[in-house]
Every structure is written in structure tokens, then in C-alpha cells.
Image (tube, rainbow, N blue to C red):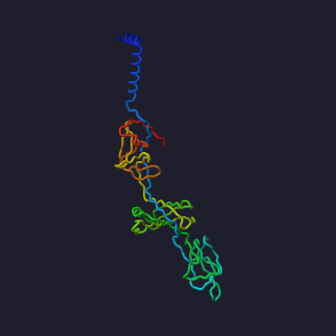
Amino acid sequence: MGHAAIAATMRRTPLLAAVGLLALIQAAAAAEDGAPKGAAVSVLKATKACFDNTVEVSGMVLARDETAVRPDRPGLKVAEVMVDAGNTVTAGQALARLTPPEGGTITIQAPVAGTVLSSSATIGAFASGRGEALFSILARNEYDLVGLVPSAQLAKLAVNQTARIRIVGAGEVDGRIRRVAPTVEPNSQLGQAFIGITGNAKLLVNAFGRAVIKIGQSCGVAVPLTAILYDSDGTVVQVVRAQRIETKRVEIGLMAGGQVEIKDGLAEGEIVVTRAGALLREGDPVRPVMASN
């Protein structure tokens, strides 16, 4: 049939012409893109990142060295108190004056520099070398954060590892591991770690603190935590390949800042569904939309 005959036939049958036009449009759409259509999903490229391997230690701020100050003989009466709790003193500074039975005056001096933690000295009271200390001094203003650590974590700690410590009421200070206990308590399986607090901050003894100790670093492929799915066999992520969902089993590592390290099962640059979910299944067609950073 010639072109003229086809045109004449279509003029005589408008419905046939419309059906033919619709078929042509559908065929053109199918030919335009052979990829499957589906729900729009937010995706991103898996990139490399580094994660700090840390151990957290919670404990109390304690005086590293607390020096008790007493007279070296009995029978002395407090005649004058020259410092109060909270005062900073220097080595050799006069703290109090005592009077012996035979008369005269004996001056009690600070054996070390530091802060007076407590004082029991009261004018008119008696003092002796065996009774309650007249003064207790935080020697050299040195503090430790002393915390209990599970045995599995204790083995990862070592002397001189650095720490960042947040202390209630005092903000953040730096620290360094000074000593790690060689034993653990048999029932709790907890051992002590002593973290020396550096700097000149004046802290409250017995204040609560939490230290984060960096014990290493690991670098590898990273994805958002929201991209991880958990099932009975472990962890998976959903990637998009040829605009279809593909499920990949992965081994995860460290986590920080909403990101998780992928130790195995995913390559850098793969297109990952940012918010994986049970509604997406293996082979489902999707329309990936790259997420903004």
C-alpha cells in the first residue's frame, strides 16, 4: 500500500490513527531508555575515611599525692591558723603557729607546694603527730583520673597514651596514661587505669570525668550508619548497579560521627543506598538520586 493510500485510510478512520500514534509514542519511550523504572532512592558513592580507635574510661578525679601535715611532737596547742582549705601554698610557707607547754612558738610549714585540700586546725585545739592531720595538701597540684576498665579494654592501654578528658564542671583537659593496673578484680573483671591530668587547671577532687584514649587509627571505605542493614547472618548494604538493587554482605569496623568503616565486602566508589530498608529487595528497579554532602 502506497503512502497516499495509507494517508487516505487514516483520514477515513480517525480512531485507527489515534491508536497508531499512541503505539508510536510508547515505542519511542521504550527505545529512549531501556533501563527499568522504579522508586527514587537517595544514594552516594562509598568513599575512604579514617577512624580513630579509642577506649573510654570513666572515673573520679583524685589527688595524685596527698600530703598530710602534722607536728612532730604531742602536747602542742594551735595559736594561729594562717591558711584555709582551697588556698594555694608554696613549699616552706607558714601554715600555722603552735605553742608548746614550755612556752615559745613552733611554726608549721608546708612540706610541698600545692593546694590545701582540708584543714582541721582550730585555734585553741591540741595537735599531735599521731592525731588527725592539721592540713592535707594536694602536692604540686597534680591530679589523676582513676577509672575502672573492663579486662578486654585494659589490655589495649599503655603508659604514655594520650587522652582527652571531659570533667563535670570543668570542661575538657588533656591527659596521659601514667599507670595501668597489672590485675583485675576477680568478680567484676575490672582493672584500674591512672590517667595523669596535664595543665594548670584547678579541679575538684572527687569530680566525675570521662576520658577518651586514642589507641590507634584505621582507614578504609566508609558509609553512613543509615546505609547498614542487620539480619540474622550479619550486616549488609544495598548498592545500585544498572539501576537495580543489589545486596552486598559486608564486615563493619569502627564507627564515628554517623559513619561506619567497611572492612570487607564493598569497594570505594560503589553507589550505596544512603537509607537502606526492608522495602527495597534484591533486583528491584530504582531511580538513584545522588545525595548532597
| Number of numbered tags placed on the structure image | 0
x, y percentage for residue 181? 43, 68
x, y percentage for residue 55? 44, 59
Q: Quadrant of residue 272?
A: top left
Taking the image as shown, residue 122 lies to the left or right of residue 268, namely right
In the displayed structure, 21 sits above or below 49; it is above
* Residue found at the far bottom of this picture: 102
Q: Quadrant of residue 275?
A: top left
x, y percentage for residue 57? 46, 62
Q: Quadrant of residue 138?
A: bottom right
Query: Which of the pair 24/110 is nearer the observer?
Result: 24
Query: Which of the pair 72/187 is nearer the observer?
Result: 187
- Quadrant where the N terminus is found in the figure: top left
x, y percentage for residue 212? 48, 59
- For image coordinates 57% across by 77% down, the residue present is 111
Taking the image as shown, residue 45 lies to the left or right of residue 94, namely left
Query: Which of the pair 283/143 is nearer the observer?
Result: 283
- For image coordinates 40% across by 52% down, the residue present is 253
Taking the image as shown, residue 23 lies to the left or right of residue 163, namely left
